[in-house]
Amino acid sequence: MTAVKDGIAPHGGTLINRLASAEQKQDFLSKADSLPEVTLDERAASDLVMIAIGGFSPLTGFMTQADYEPVVTDMRLASGLPWSVPVTLSVSEAVAEPLQIGQLVRLNDDKGRFIGVLELSEKYTYDKKKEAINVYRTDEDKHPGVKVVYDQGPINLAGDIWLLERDAHPLFPTYQIDPAVSRQQFRDRGWKTIVGFQTRNPIHRAHEYIQKCALETVDGLFLHPLVGATKSDDIPADVRMRCYEIMMEHYFPQDRVILAINPSAMRYAGPREAIFHALIRKNYGCTHFIVGRDHAGVGDYYGTYDAQAIFDEFEPAELGITPMKFEHAFYCKRTSTMATTKTSPSTPEERIHLSGTKVRGLLREGKLPPPEFSRPEVAAELAKAMHQS
């Protein structure tokens, strides 16, 4: 895959925009009191936004059964285009029963605000266990992604959506850079090759190492931490973002790095989510995507490097974004540097392996992560946040 003059094409060829025009919004608002209502949870609300801004291109709404079923079984939309994770609006039978095909449905957030409209085209049932096993590789409800599937309603509502208004993010408005804007920023900087980086954890030295290794080979780095719904024991988004701000100020070349938020929710789908995350960054304009040892993993549900191997199930041209696969990075005591088995002569006993899980464990014990784990300013920020919580 090579970058094109005006940037990489979005997935499916067109950057979707489902933000209502001023006239559409006024029309929808005038009908608000007469429309049937569906309340979205945090994940569905973030999916609504991601569809509307083009982050989930080519999706224009919540998936029909014709798209949903091949996505679950074969990681492809009905068109044959690669897509690895279902994006559905699931409701109870009581909510679905009175809704009529062809209706406009008012979509509310969990505070009751009218935020979007669904053009209802279909209602269908689905097999929760089949989705769990195929997408998450387990049917255990201890898996956070599987638990979401089991807890949600048995009916999927399908159809195109409209987002009434693109609100500024309540915590990170200056980092809210939507796909159309990120693409323009890349063009303005003259970047032809851009590598995206996904994380839900505070940045540690292994992250920094692979980011900078990648940056040696491309024009720019798009740091894109996820700030949507995550597990309750994950470090809060505001803390993680402060850590990235520290890194931007002290440890990254600011003219070659853009920090922005990814407003979508975590699925914890491991290998399938690695594909999903890559396609999202393609829509934001990235030509390359960093894939680590256990991308979007949780517990012991996925094998080492499964998230890298899954990219080999697709032709490079049909994904349209180049994965950059990195070995598990560690601090090498012998060379006093970050390294991987590809670059370090050390024995296993000379390696300090880093992970977000280890950092969280140290913080819970009241210990400051050592400099081999985190930059001292980042470690101090994490400790302060843990003390305040």
Image (tube, rainbow, N blue to C red):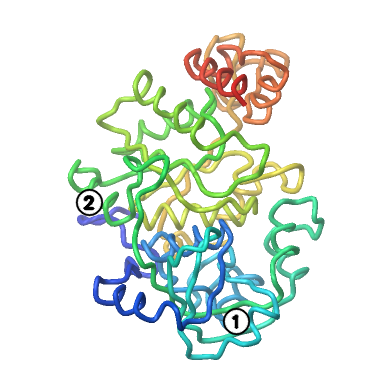
Location of the N terminus (image quadrant): bottom left
Say which quarter of the image contains residue 248: top left
Q: Residue at x 70, y 22 (%)?
A: 364
- State the CA–CA distance, disc 1 to disc 2: 35 Å
Amino acid type assigned to the residue bearing label 2 in the image: Gln
Amino acid type assigned to the residue bearing label 1 in the image: Gln
Residue 246: horizontal and vertical position, in percent? 41, 22
Q: Residue at x 56, y 36 (%)?
A: 236
Q: Is residue 148 above or below residue 388?
A: below
Residue 8: horizontal and vertical position, in percent? 30, 57
Element carrying mark 1: helix
28 displayed left or right of 325: left
For disc 1, the neighbor class at 10 Å (few under 14, some 14 to 19, many from 20) is: some
The residue that mark 2 highlights is: 184
Residue 218: horizontal and vertical position, in percent? 33, 38
The dot on residue 159 is none
For disc 2, the neighbor class at 10 Å (few under 14, some 14 to 19, many from 20) is: some
The residue that mark 1 highlights is: 65
Residue 217: horizontal and vertical position, in percent? 35, 35
Which sits earlier in the primary sequence, circle 1 or circle 2? 1
Q: Is residue 37 above or below residue 114?
A: below
- Whether residues under marks 1 and 2 lie with C-beta atoms below 8 angstroms apart, the answer is no
